[in-house]
Amino acid sequence: MLGEAIPILMKKLDKLQNHSAQMPNISENILRIRQLIAEARKAASKVSVPVKFNGTSGVQVRTPSNLADLAAYTSLKFYITLPEASRARRQDQPDKQFVFYLGNKDSSKEFLGMKLEGQRLHWLFNVGGDTTEVEMPEEVQTDGNFNNVVLERILQYGQMAMTSETRVTKAVVEAEGDSGLLNLQTEETVFYVGGYPDTFTPPLQLQLPNFKGCIELETLNEEVLSLYNFENIFQLNTTEEKPCGRTKPVLTQQWVNDAAYFDGTGYAEVTLKEDTGKMQRFEQEVKLMSHNGILLMLLSQEKFLSLAVRQGRLRVFYDVTGSLQELEPKDPDSPYLKISDADPKSLEIIILYDTTTRVVVRNNRQTLLNHIFTTPLPRFEASYYLAGVPEDKMPENLKTLFPRQGSLKGCFRNIKAMNSHIDLKRMTSSGVSYGCANDLLVAREAHFSGQSYLDLSPDSIPGLRNNFYAGFGFRSDQKNGLMFYHQAQDGVCQVFLDKGHVVVRVGNNEVKTQKTYNDDNDHYVTLYSNNNRLRVYVDDVLEKNGDTGRGGGSSRAALSPGGVYLGGTPDNSLNNLTGCLSNLFIKK
């Protein structure tokens, strides 16, 4: 089986590479084979086809690349349907089946899981305390149609939603205790769907017969997911149990069904027709999340012209004489140069060949650049790249600006070259899937430069003495910086780094961590405040320093009541943060 062959192949490649240090050609070939395997796995992760489970089979899905991203917030989306026989069996004692488990190999630790009782799904999760469970009141369909299931959890709070043709049903759940992180380590994490191997012991609630029905994975924390990107399979024979067919609804919403989603790891190579005439015109509509990368790259041997984004702004770089140049926009302050906000933009780059060469760049029909070249541009006739470039094709003088591939995260639709529509499904691509739902473009992390901040105005936040509960992720290598500031009606709450220590100050109370956390790794801080005390957790560990009872309030001038500032505030009484904040949570 392929699931067994690839790990064996990788081990043999490791062994061969250890013996080929003096043979560069062999080492290069081994690296190329590894790259091809990685590309195959990446392609497998985009396969949107359900798997049919027969009650004895199961799949171990490849562990997600960024498990730390699942710690505070987890969103899993999938499709599910049951065989018709399930309807006849549901009258008496309902059958119970295992659906999935994502968590630690030691199942007494943190996990997410699901089981089926009759036709009703039960979602379970453990984030450091007791396991909590919630039942979906709506039954899974047995008529061949699929239900779409969405699981969302932030800290101890979870919501399960299930969509059928006519309605959406929701169920909410709250885990007990102060712990709220799903702590998963790469080497100690498994993801089983449909069934599990004999070597694994699931939690007692999930020690059930294997699943019978069809499942198709969709996304995990905005990362496209597929059961065909497996690490192992158990008694699954796709020849005998052919994949189920899922009828996809006819969607009329733009982007949802007619866009390509680039996940920030790849690119698309678009082949051009040979005869381009005196004008080359490249058009695309984009919704962009990335602040740095290559939007479009035109290459002709060592010469190039590139439409790019740097720090969220549209830029045009080129090299036709052996040195890197940049085109200056007509209006450097134009708001149309800002494109990394996930809003739709219609971008055009037009090259006019005549006695001189002219390049025009437009966004939403607004001309941003209009440049006449003194040195003629070559004709770009073979192909061009979208949303990134293969590493071996990246121009040398762009590598300092765009490491590796310059890949972008975002969505592209209505792509045209010389007025001809481009079907990306027919083009060579990597890191691309199809369909662009809005939740793929959610920003849960923000980077702060030391001069920036975010100003939020959330509604209905409780007072600092009324069971105030908040948390956020942070990452910084700086010793000092303000991360969170909230001007409540009954006082001020602020969280900042002081010589690497996390300091939480709420009214007259203060907690300072014993350890330092300016190690440029991901951490998560939560705080609970009421009339009696202030409790602070970093990475789910209660800070034993306790409340220092510091007297006095904030040294800052009073800001708007109810406001929340992230990464700093408008005044300069405390350094603003240089680093990242993510997954902000404030209980209402």
Image (cartoon, rainbow, N blue to C red):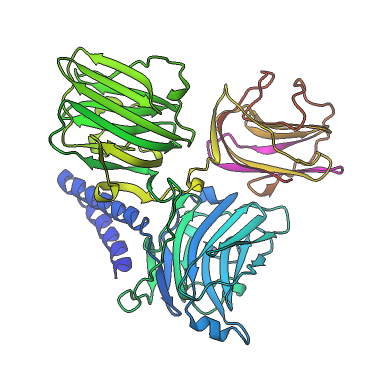
Magenta span of residues: 510-537
Q: Quadrant of residue 380?
A: top left
Q: Between 190 and 485, which is closer to the camera in this rendering?
A: 485
- The residue most toward the top is 374
Describe residue 452's horizontal placement relative to residue 321 as left or right: right
Q: Position of residue 60 (x, y in %)?
A: 43, 66
Quadrant where the N terminus is found in the figure? bottom left
Q: How many circles with numbers are drawn on the protein?
A: 0
With 13 as the anchor, is 202 left or right in this view?
A: right
One can see residue 104 in this view: no
Residue 276 visible here: yes
Question: Which residue is found at the position 23% from the left and 24% from the top?
Answer: 351
Residue 336 image-quadrant placement = top left
Tell me the residue at 21%/31% (across/down): 299
| Image spot of residue 469 (x, y percent) | 74, 44
User: Compared to 436, does 245 lie above or below?
Assistant: below
**Residue at the spot 38% in from the left edge and 46% down from the top edge:** 259
Q: Position of residue 450 (x, y in %)?
A: 57, 23
Kindly report the secondary structure that dominates the magenta region of the rendered protein: strand
Q: Is residue 515 magenta?
A: yes
